[in-house]
Image: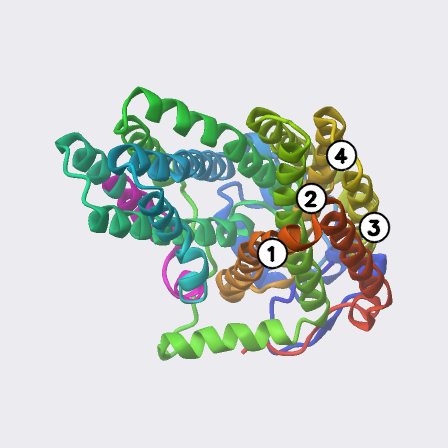
């Protein structure tokens, strides 16, 4: 599939016949010369890494094969630095409410701090995406990492002093969440600058596996450290962020294409341009709608399963184990996601994933055995891991470099906002319908979503990139 490098040139791609290995792309190197030039220069390995001579107007299939990702220095540093930052962020995500709860004995205060940490996911995504497309991404990564280290270090000092002022912790949590959003968007947008186009799938597979691994390891790490001392997870996070900055400082290449020397517009104008670009991506809009619905349903399913386990006499450990197995399945799915994207079209993956989720949801309504539920959740997590890799690959390839920050911010806003609505809706449904009926209703909604995807004209005809603003 050929990425839309020229924002004013329409490109039509049929996802039903999507060749994820980009065999067809090599027949268009003349049109994509600007993109391949940037990729080869910024990867730090020139033609050896990209397999395409910069600026060449012909097929260069006879050149040496691209360097494996494990030997791509810039990609390894970017992957490792972002991984350390994610791990630190996951650890503090659980440490904030725990530390506040133990310091103030107030569940309400703990909930406020946890909300302040997550609020930037909704409030600053769109402007952050525009800034990632406007500013130098390398500097954003370094500044965000240093800022997070400073914030977590300040929180550790505050807790150590014995003055755990709620307003200060709220401000620190919001600041750390905002910097985390900036870091994540900049890192996602920078990946295509350090790997050749034919390795985008493998790079996204590695990134999704890293994200899943950080989620699995970060929460128990944060809770374990906070039981030893409230300051420890924040000190560890500060050190982790500094280590991440050290990795990113050593990335040699640029992390974006050269920006055109055009007059700077207002931030709101750039955000609107991103919204206009997304509106014209019919296929992507349909996929994002399906993702939003499925995120709502799975958040509701998690709460329903916990309620069902509780009413059947289960323990908190069993409920936590079931949800943890979902994360483990997601990690396995992420590791194998690249192979699925090479063999199946994006449309097939979307419809197949929604159908598989429907089939896995239905038995949850009648099962209460934690081992059986854990197996179903692991399989559902596996499908989610594959789905995330495929979606990440697709978004990177269709979004031009100058629009990647905003494209990722919109995708994350839709997914994150939908996740926030799931538990609330499920809570009311559980009180009025009970666990079994609620899960059956969730399964029916997932089946309707799969059917809508199957008959969707946007998914059938594929994406049409008509404008990018």
Whether residue 65 is situated above or below residue 269 in the rendered picture: above
Q: Is residue 465 visible?
A: yes
Res 366 quadrant in image: top right
Q: Name the residue under label 1.
A: 428
Q: Is residue 265 magenta?
A: no
Place of residue 432 in the rendered image (x, y in percent of width and height, measured from the top left): 66, 55
* Label at residue 376: 4
Q: Mark 3 points at which residue?
A: 355
| Mark 4 or 2: the one toward you | 4
Place of residue 273 in the rendered image (x, y in percent of width and height, measured from the top left): 50, 77
Q: Do the residues labelled 2 and 1 touch (CB within 8 Å)?
A: no
Q: Quadrant of the C terminus?
A: bottom right
Specify the segment rendered in magenta: 129-150
Place of residue 308 in the rendered image (x, y in percent of width and height, measured from the top left): 67, 38
| Mark 2 or 1: the one toward you | 1
Question: Of callouts 3 and 4, which one flags the residue occurring earlier in the amino acid sequence?
Answer: 3
Q: How crowded is mark 1: few (under 14 residues within 10 Å), some or many (20 or more)?
A: few
Q: Is mark 3 on a helix, strand or loop?
A: helix
Secondary structure character of the magenta stretch overall: helix
Look at 25% across and 38% down and name the residue there. Answer: 104
Q: Do the residues labelled 2 and 3 touch (CB within 8 Å)?
A: no
Question: Of callouts 1 and 3, which one flags the residue occurring earlier in the amino acid sequence?
Answer: 3
Residue 42 in the figure: left or right of residue 366 = left
Look at 36% across and 54% down and name the residue there. Answer: 178
Residue 128 in the figure: left or right of residue 230 = right
């Amino acid at each position: 599939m050929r990425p839309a490098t020229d924002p004013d040139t329409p490109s039509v791609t049929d996802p039903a016949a999507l060749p994820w290995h980009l065999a067809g792309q090599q027949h268009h190197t003349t049109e994509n010369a600007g993109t391949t030039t940037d990729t080869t220069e910024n990867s730090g390995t020139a033609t050896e890494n990209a397999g395409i001579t910069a600026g060449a107007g012909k097929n260069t299939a006879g050149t040496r094969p691209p360097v494996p990702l494990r030997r791509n220095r810039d990609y390894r540093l970017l992957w490792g630095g972002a991984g350390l930052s994610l791990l630190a962020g996951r650890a503090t995500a659980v440490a904030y409410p725990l530390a506040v709860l133990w310091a103030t004995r107030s569940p309400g205060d703990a909930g406020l701090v946890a909300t302040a940490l997550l609020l930037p996911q909704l409030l600053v995504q769109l402007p952050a995406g525009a800034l990632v497309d406007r500013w130098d991404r390398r500097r954003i990564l370094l500044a965000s990492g240093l800022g997070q280290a400073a914030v977590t270090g300040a929180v550790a000092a505050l807790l150590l002093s014995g003055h755990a002022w709620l307003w200060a912790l709220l401000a620190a949590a919001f600041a750390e969440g905002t910097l985390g959003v900036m870091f994540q968007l900049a890192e996602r947008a920078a990946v295509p600058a350090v790997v050749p186009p034919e390795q985008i799938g493998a790079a996204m597979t590695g990134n999704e596996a890293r994200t899943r691994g950080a989620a699995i390891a970060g929460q128990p790490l944060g809770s374990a450290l906070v039981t030893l001392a409230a300051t420890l997870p924040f000190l560890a996070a500060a050190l982790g962020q500094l280590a991440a900055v050290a990795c990113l400082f050593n990335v040699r290449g640029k992390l974006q294409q050269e920006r055109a020397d055009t007059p700077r517009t207002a931030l709101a104008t750039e955000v609107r341009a991103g919204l206009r670009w997304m509106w014209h991506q019919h296929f992507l809009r349909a996929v994002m709608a399906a993702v939003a619905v499925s995120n709502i349903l799975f958040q509701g399913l998690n709460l329903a399963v916990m309620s069902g386990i509780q009413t059947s006499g289960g323990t908190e450990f069993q409920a936590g184990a079931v949800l943890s197995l979902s994360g483990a399945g997601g990690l396995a799915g992420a590791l194998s996601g690249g192979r699925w994207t090479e063999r199946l079209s994006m449309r097939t993956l979307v419809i197949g994933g929604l159908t598989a989720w429907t089939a896995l949801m239905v038995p949850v309504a009648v099962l209460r055995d934690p081992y059986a539920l854990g197996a179903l959740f692991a399989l559902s997590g596996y499908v989610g891991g594959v789905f995330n890799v495929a979606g990440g690959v697709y978004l990177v390839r269709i979004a031009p470099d100058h629009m990647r920050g905003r494209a990722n911010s919109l995708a994350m806003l839709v997914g994150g906002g939908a996740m926030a609505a799931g538990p609330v809706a499920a809570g009311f449904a559980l009180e009025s319908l009970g666990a079994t009926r609620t899960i059956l209703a969730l399964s029916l909604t997932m089946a309707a979503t799969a059917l809508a995807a199957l008959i969707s004209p946007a998914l059938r005809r594929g994406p049409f990139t008509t404008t990018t603003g």
